[in-house]
Every structure is written in structure tokens, then in C-alpha cells.
Amino acid sequence: MDKYAEISVFLSVADEGSFSAAARKQEMTPSAVSKLIARLEQRLNVRLFERIAGTIRLTQEGERFRAAGARVVQAMVDAEDAVHLRDADISGLVRIHTALTTAKYLIAPRLPALLDRHPRLRLDFVLGTERADFIRQGLDVAIHSGRPTELTLVGRPLMLRPWVIAAAPSYLERFGAPAHPRDLLRHRCLNFTIRTQWNSWTFQDEGDVRTVDIPRHIGANQGELLRTLALQGLGVVRLAHFNITGDLRAGRLVPLLSAFQRHSEEDRFYLLYPGGRSLAPRVRAVVDFLAEQLAGPDV
């Protein structure tokens, strides 16, 4: 790895405050990041980070190296910007595949900023919960949860997608609220008809991870319809937090079993795009924008 790349990794660790977060940002493993920092400290013959009780913080030497490294990175950015296409020159169609709820609640509110930055871009959304087929569907970019397995795609990790179990007040008035995950087996539940792993709800119970296979009273292949059914008082639903955050705040849905909730790396969003070749400027513009907007905080 060249010195510029080393500085980039070092700055990621300094900014994120952890090796694991920097590893996600740099698309590396935490052990690779840790070894790189150790080699850098050995080459410079200084300690850049203090490691105390599982946390890290910059030493005085690390702070000075951070300031100097930031100037180096900015100089490289300025040099690349001098030869890149101007924002106004970025144009053409970009096809994006993702689920309806992701497009509606996470991407659509951010599109004005993207199109203000690149007014000549055009976007087509291909909506679905199935995994994207880039060649058959003519796609440029996709956003899905779960680490990608396709060797031809780059997967940039984004935010986590926490799940929330909830029901409408009208449902709870009729049927009561479950006090324990096992009580869900006696309730009317709304669930997906696709991605059957989403129908196994996982909980943290007294330190153990337990999974409950939830029978569905009504099923659908789109989370937005399940949300509508839950709002009608038809059952208990488990949906992404960003999908129902407005309903929770307004009291239209009531969160349930919060003490048993757990969040898994399996529910992290990934930004997918073809690897092994240079991206067209129009695609690179969209990829960089979405990575910037959806990198966190987790929602």
C-alpha cells in the first residue's frame, strides 16, 4: 500500500475513533487496518494512537500527523478536481434498484440536493425486494441489505437498518400487547411473503439470541403495504425504523418488545455497483452522493 493510501486509512481511524468503523469506511477488515497502523507507527517510530480500555485516541504526535495528512489528502483532491469533469458536465441516465420503502423514505428526500448539484442527471428507479440483476435489468447502482455475494459487484457498507415491532393503538385495545416474544405466537402478525428470513424475528433474551418463526395473519411482498395494514389495526408488524418513524412519533403505531430488540450486521445496507472497471462520471456522481448521504448515522 502506498503512503497516500496509508494516510487515508490513518485519517479514517482518527475520524471514526475505531478500527472497525474505519475498516467499513475503507472496505477493509479491522485486522488489516490495525496492522497497517502498527506498520505506520513502526516506520515513523512514534505512537500515533493511545489504546486504553478498548478505546483509542490520538497522541500529540498523532494530532500533528493528522493535520499534515489532511493537507496531503486535500491537495490530492484538488489535483483530481482540476482534471475531472465539472459538475455541470455530469449528465445522462442512472438506473437505481432498491426496495420501495428505501426509495421513498431514504432516497427521495435527498434527491433535491443531488439534482441541484448535478442538474443534467436523469434517474430511473427499478423497485423490488429481490436481489438486483445488473445485466438483465440494465442497472447502474443498487441498495440492498446484507453483504453482497456477487464477485462482480463492489459493496460499500452504509447504515444499519434497525427493525421495530409495532402495532396500532386500536389493535392493542382489542388484543393487548405482547409482554414476551413468545406471546407473538398468539397474536395476529403481518409479515413478508418474500425473503422468508425476514419472517424469523430475532430477539435478545437474558443474554441469549433467540429466533421466533412468526406465522403471518396477512402477508405482502412490500413493507409499505404492511405498514398500511398495521395502521388499520390489523396486526403486529416488524418493519424498518425509517419506514415507520413518523408513525411512531405521531402515536399512530406503538413500539413493542423494545427491551428484547437486537441489531445485526446482517441488516446493514450496502451500496452496490459494478467492479473491475472505471465508473462513468454520471454513475460515480450518484454513488458518491448516496455513500455520503447514507453512511450514517444508523436509522
Image (cartoon, rainbow, N blue to C red):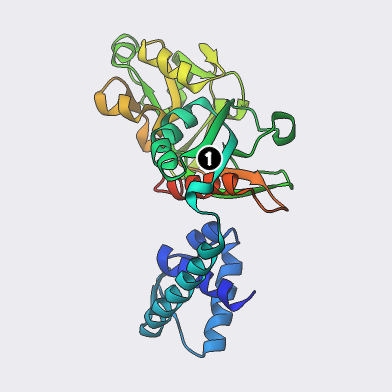
Q: Nearer the viewer, residue 232 or 130?
A: 130
Of helix, strand and loop, which one carries label 1? helix
**Vertically, is 246 above or below 59?**
above
Residue that appears at 59% across and 44% down: 283
Answer whether residue 291 is visible to the viewer in this image. Answer: no
- Say which residue label 1 marks: 267
Q: Is residue 299 left or right of residue 158?
A: left
Q: Nearer the viewer, residue 96 or 227?
A: 96
Residue 121 place in picture, x, y as percent:
52, 38
Residue that appears at 52% across and 74% down: 7
Answer whether residue 184 is visible to the viewer in this image. Answer: yes
Residue that appears at 51% across and 61% down: 20
Residue 18 place in picture, x, y as percent:
45, 65
Q: Please name the amino acid that badge 1 sits on.
A: Asp
Which quarter of the picture shows residue 68? bottom left
**Vertically, is 133 above or below 50?**
above
Q: Is residue 83 left or right of residue 110?
A: right
Q: Is residue 114 left or right of residue 284?
A: left
Q: Is residue 128 left or right of residue 258?
A: right
**Vertically, is 102 above or below 171?**
below
